[in-house]
Image: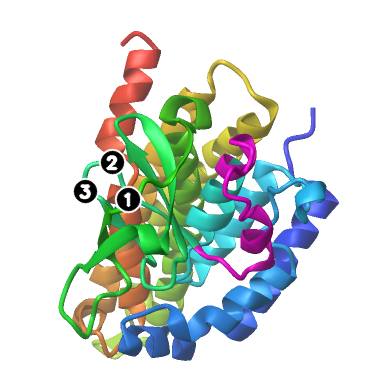
Amino acid sequence: MHFGFDEDQIAVRDAVASVLDKRCDVAALQQAWRAGSAAPLIPLWEELAGIGVTGLLAPEEAGGSGLDWVTMALVLAETGRVALPLPVLETAAVAVPVLVAAGDPSGIVGSVVEGSVVVSVVSEGSGMAPAAGVAGAFVADRSGEVFLYDRSEVALEPVGSVDRTRDLARVTPTGPGSPLGTLEALRVKELCALGAAAQLVGLGRELVRMTVEYVKDRRQFGVPVGSFQAVKHHLADAHLAVEFAAPPVWAAAHQTTSGGPEWSRSVSMAKAMASDAANLAARVALQCHGAMGYTDDYHLHFWLKRVWCLAAAYGSSAEHTAKVATALGI
């Protein structure tokens, strides 16, 4: 049995990574941060749509690529690696397959695939949605029933200060919306959790990498901080945690495509392990960077904040661990 990625999956991952490396550097992140919105990165969104990211899970007849969730997980890990503040998870990994499964009652899958419509997902309970400022439609749960709302059918209440909303807003439906199906049948919760887990793997790996580079240069007592054994141990622990969390994410992604009775449990295991690993990587990165890591003037905070948000979103580590325990009868 082959436990690895095929050539097509690797090619897609590398193509996306190449675009992100060129177009989503620290300067681009800082521009979006100063604007308090992902709007400055919309040209990048259109470029990603042009190479097929938004339609990766859509069938060919809808203009998509018809690829599998393992490929999507690899792409999401790349978006995490660069701390991309665009809703690839919500649009490409959740909204597109949900709309396709529901028969696309609003007829917008084609527009989503081509990149002209951005879709966000409203979190259950809090009613908040990321990238609400640039979203043209919203997928939301209403008492176990999933609806698609056009931007004209919702009221947005930005969360945070006026000049720093980060596009996060509380979404309140004001129109009827289009019913898509039940939450359980469309697997919205699981898709969100799995996508977040994949992004957390990318975030955790990049935090470890950039911290290793930082401690090579930062000096204390006349020597590089990275030469201290305690620093090496912390970074080794973070690296191991992230690399041990990655295989369960790929396994859950594989089961999303192939199906199986243990899929939901696998997703919970992936989200729990990825959340814990990325949180550890974030804590170690912050410790090793010292005071520099606490300032918005240094770019580390882009990765830290995304880890903290994603680790808590779509079910915390504790919640998913409890689900795994229940599934195993523990």
Q: In this view, does 144 lie to the left or right of 162?
A: right
Q: Disc 1 designates what residue?
A: 311
At x 35% / y 54%, what residue is drawn?
A: 310
Q: Pointer 2 and pointer 1: residues touching (CB < 8 Å)?
A: yes
Name which residue type carries label 3. Ser
Counting residues from the start of the chain, the first of labels 2 and 1 encountered is 1
Q: Residue lying farthest top?
A: 329
Residue 116 sits above or below residue 252 on the image? below
Could you tell me if residue 269 is visible in this image? Answer: no
- Residue assigned mark 2: 316
Residue 77: percent from the left, percent from the top? Answer: 55, 57
Query: Which sits in the foreground, 240 or 122?
Result: 122
Q: Earlier in the sequence, mark 3 or mark 1?
A: 3
Q: What stretch is highlighted in magenta?
A: 98-118
Marks 3 and 2, how far apart at CA: 14 Å
Closer to the camera, 221 or 202? 202
Q: Between tags 3 and 1, which lies in front?
A: 3
Task: Give the structural element (helix, strand or loop) at label 2.
Answer: loop
Q: In this view, does 155 lie above or below 28?
A: above
Q: Is residue 295 visible?
A: yes
**The N terminus appears in which quarter of the rendering?**
top right
